[in-house]
Amino acid sequence: MNGRWVTYFLAGALVIVVFGALLRLLEPFFRPIFWALILGLYLFPINRFFRRRLKGRRGLSALLLTFLVVFFVLLPLSFVLTEVTRQALEIVGQARKILQSGPEGIVFSLQKYPRIYALVKSILLKLSPFENQLKQLLAAVASGAGQFLLTQGKALFRNTVQLFLDLVFMLITLFYLFRDGDLFYEELKKLLPTTVEETERITGKVQEVLRAVLFGGLLTGLAQGVAALIIYLLLGVSPAVLLGLLTAASSFVPLVGTTLVWGPVAIYLLLKASVIKALILLLYGALVISQIDSLLRPFIVGSQTEIHTLFLFFSILGGLKVFGLLGVFLGPIILSLAISLVEIYRLKVQNARTA
């Protein structure tokens, strides 16, 4: 008996050591592998379509779809991110120059915005007894902005190299997932300590959540961001691309949603004395941008996910905090797995009571 427990202990320790070493080996490639898995899950129906058209040629279908991902997903995304980064750094640089000029420079830079100019001038007049302290504060903020630009410039160079390598690893993984992903999936199902029904329940829940996140969340947010970008460009609001991206991101925030971005922009236009533009943006934001969510989400998703929106929201926020951008998908996946396991446990308890 003691010998059997020793054998079990040694076998368990060996399994932990081996799998720990395996995870350590794969850790540098964690992000590209998971991005490839997520893209592979979403695009596998297209992969099946290509296979049928190409008469079952797995390799050719996988290669063709990988090239399509590069040209229609990665290249447009890289252009958008480059433009957003440029606009963000330009704003910080302009703000630094204004802050370095002191209170007088701030007031002078706002002369072309009458209402904002009057408001800021009245505030600075009230703060005139603290002029020296205010100048020191502005100088400190300007210095911090300069340090931020320097740090971001160095980080941008390092991240560009790392991003390129991650993209290469992701594309390699994606090709093999397109070619052999269904075979991997079938082998994985055999290893799971669950029945066929339980496995299908888990995979079905994960697919349901991924569909809700992508089609109900990301695509709806993208549509709202594009709609906002159009009106920002037409009204001459700058930086339009950055504001459009922020509008898309704010679609995930409950209750307020995209109003979190286009609302302050409308207030800015009003203070700038552009009353007509402010009214146009308010009407367009309320009747078009904000309504896209309620009109498009049910149409795209079809049926609502069984997971409550509040839980999805916090799983996405938690995923962003822990895993970065990848957490937008990993957070809901972990949530769906947890809910699936709870449901399986509940069914087993009910069956045991019935028996």
Image (cartoon, rainbow, N blue to C red):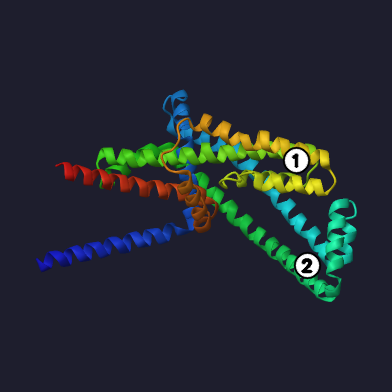
Q: Nearer the viewer, residue 276 or 289?
A: 276
Q: Which residue is mark 2?
A: 142
Residue at horizontal 37 percent and vertical 62 percent from the top: 21
Q: Along the horizontal axis of the image, is 104 left or right of 3?
A: right
Q: Is disc 1 placed on a helix, strand or loop?
A: helix
Q: Position of residue 62 (x, y in %)?
A: 48, 35
Please tell me how many numbered marks the rendered image carries.
2
Circle 2 Cα neighbour tier, 10 Å, few/some/many (<14 / 14–19 / ≥20) = many
Q: Along the horizontal axis of the image, is 171 left or right of 286?
A: left
Amino acid under disc 1 = Tyr
Quarter holding the C terminus? top left
Q: Position of residue 192 (x, y in %)?
A: 28, 46
Residue at horizontal 84 percent and vertical 57 percent from the top: 119
> In the current view of this chain or complex, which residue is farthest to the bottom?
132
Residue at horizontal 34 percent and vertical 45 percent from the top: 340
**Residue 240 makes an appearance in the image:** yes
Tag of residue 232: 1
Q: Nearer the viewer, residue 174 or 199?
A: 199
Circle 1 Cα neighbour tier, 10 Å, few/some/many (<14 / 14–19 / ≥20) = many
Determine the image quadrant of residue 93: bottom right
Q: Position of residue 45 (x, y in %)?
A: 45, 31
Give how far apart the Cα atoms at labels 2 and 1 are. 28 Å
